[in-house]
């Protein structure tokens, strides 16, 4: 299995969980990470899964496919499963150079940016099969790559809904919140894709109406990224220091989700966002941008609220409705939790990958 990096992120955590599950199912695995040893390497090693790091740079580092090919020649695999765009492209070339018979590309998001779409279009023909993380991602990737329906499957991530639904919420007092405060939580990288700027703008609009709101609103941003300093500056400029907090990366993100009154995902594009899966499994209401994988998880006004991506006014309106219609918010959260229990188990996810690997390895080539 090949992945771009093993830093803490939704796709990376799903990769580790899948690797663990396939190992338990009897597959002999090793993991190759294109970059250095991120924090999730230890999780794999704890499960006795060997990890090789290639210490390559970003997408422009042309050494990656050749280093992969050398690794494949040294220890020839029967199949390669890769996650994330850089790893997918490098693995396609590496498999072709080393003569690996089966390559599966894990399509985690439908990234329509020109450089990504172009390299996907040029190299997708060299993959045996693609696995998209959601129906909307599958449809978008088919248009980007030009692959036939028969070469793309949909396998959703799983989620530990039993654990999440029973998890003890984090103590609000550590952030200075009272029981009556309305906590809006964002969990994710502070990067352009996640568009935390739209969330902050929406919160400003909402906070301007604080005098007529039934509860004191608070915004908690969990995560790190290039936009943090810019966001902190804007918080200071607009005098929001007392109601907006930056918590950095947290190991207890799941407990924070249980603590929150609503979780907001303001991304410009997504695959099947883990934070939405986990929030729904935990019974916490969700507001998400109407993009790809979010559309597969959130049925607007039934299991959560959707808003137009990049539109802070629409997000502020959704937040206002959420706060002022608590009974509807609770009802939507309960419906979302039931949906997750029916459709998103890790056992089912791993079983589908297991069956796909067996089918592709047995197919005539």
Image: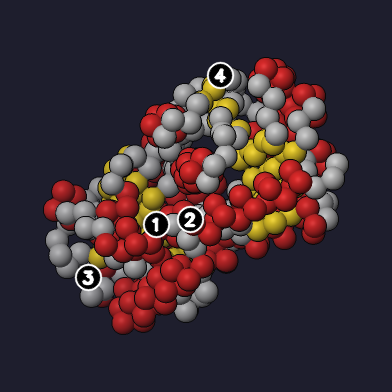
- In percent of width and height, residue 239 lies at 27, 50
Vertical relation: 58 (above or below) 333: above
Residue 164 visible (yes or no) = yes
Distance in Å between CA atoms under marks 4 and 3: 49 Å
Distance in Å between CA atoms under marks 2 and 4: 30 Å
Residue position for label 4 = 55
Which sits in the foreground, 48 or 136? 48
Instruction: Please tell me whether mark 3 sits on a helix, a strand or a loop.
Output: loop
Q: Residues within 10 Å of mark 4 (few under 14, many from 20)?
A: some
Outermost residue to the right: 365
- In percent of width and height, residue 317 lies at 43, 71
Instruction: Please tell me whether mark 4 sits on a helix, a strand or a loop.
Output: loop
Kindly identify the residue that appears in the image at 48 percent across and 71 percent down. 342
Residue position for label 1 = 160
- In percent of width and height, residue 218 lies at 26, 58
Residue 298 shown left or right of residue 235 in the figure = right
Residue position for label 3 = 215
Instruction: Please tell me whether mark 1 sits on a helix, a strand or a loop.
Output: loop
Kindly identify the residue that appears in the image at 57 percent across and 66 percent down. 296
User: Looking at the rendered structure, which numbered label has been put on residue 346?
Assistant: 2
Which sits in the foreground, 2 or 205? 2
Closest to the camera, between mark 1 and mark 4, is 1
Residue 247 shown left or right of residue 60 in the figure = left
Q: Residues within 10 Å of mark 1 (few under 14, many from 20)?
A: some
Labels 1 & 2 near each other (Cβ < 8 A): yes
Distance in Å between CA atoms under marks 2 and 3: 37 Å
Distance in Å between CA atoms under marks 1 and 3: 31 Å
Labels 2 & 3 near each other (Cβ < 8 A): no
């Amino acid at each position: 299995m090949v992945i771009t990096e093993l830093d803490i992120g939704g796709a990376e955590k799903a990769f580790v969980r899948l690797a663990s599950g396939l190992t338990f199912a009897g597959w002999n695995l090793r993991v190759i990470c294109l970059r250095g040893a991120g924090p999730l390497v230890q999780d794999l090693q704890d499960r006795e899964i060997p990890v090789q790091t290639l210490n390559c740079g970003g997408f422009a580092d042309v050494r990656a496919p050749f280093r992969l090919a050398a690794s494949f020649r040294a220890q020839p695999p029967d199949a390669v499963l890769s996650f994330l765009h850089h790893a997918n492209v490098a693995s396609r070339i590496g498999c072709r150079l080393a003569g690996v018979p089966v390559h599966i590309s894990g399509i985690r998001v439908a990234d329509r940016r020109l450089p990504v779409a172009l390299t996907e279009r040029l190299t997708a023909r060299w993959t045996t099969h693609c696995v998209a993380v959601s129906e909307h991602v599958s449809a978008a990737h088919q248009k980007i790559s030009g692959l036939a329906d028969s070469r793309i499957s949909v396998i959703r991530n799983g989620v530990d809904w039993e654990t999440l639904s029973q998890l003890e919420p984090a103590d609000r007092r550590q952030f200075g919140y009272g029981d009556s405060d309305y906590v809006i939580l964002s969990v994710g990288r502070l990067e352009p894709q996640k568009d935390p700027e739209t969330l902050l703008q929406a919160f400003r609009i909402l906070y301007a109406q604080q005098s007529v709101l039934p509860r004191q609103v608070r915004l908690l941003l969990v995560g790190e990224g290039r936009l943090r300093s810019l966001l902190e500056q804007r918080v200071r400029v607009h005098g929001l220091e007392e109601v907006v907090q930056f918590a950095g990366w947290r190991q207890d993100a799941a407990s924070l989700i249980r603590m929150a009154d609503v979780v907001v995902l303001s991304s410009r594009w997504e695959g099947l966002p883990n934070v939405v899966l986990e929030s729904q499994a935990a019974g916490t209401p969700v507001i998400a941008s109407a993009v790809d994988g979010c559309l597969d998880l959130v049925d607007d006004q039934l299991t959560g609220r959707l808003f137009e991506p990049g539109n802070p006014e629409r997000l502020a309106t959704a937040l206002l409705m959420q706060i002022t219609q608590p009974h509807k918010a609770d009802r939507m959260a309960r419906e979302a939790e039931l949906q997750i229990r029916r459709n998103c188990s890790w056992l089912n996810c791993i079983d589908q990958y297991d069956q796909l690997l067996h089918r592709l390895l047995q197919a005539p080539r």
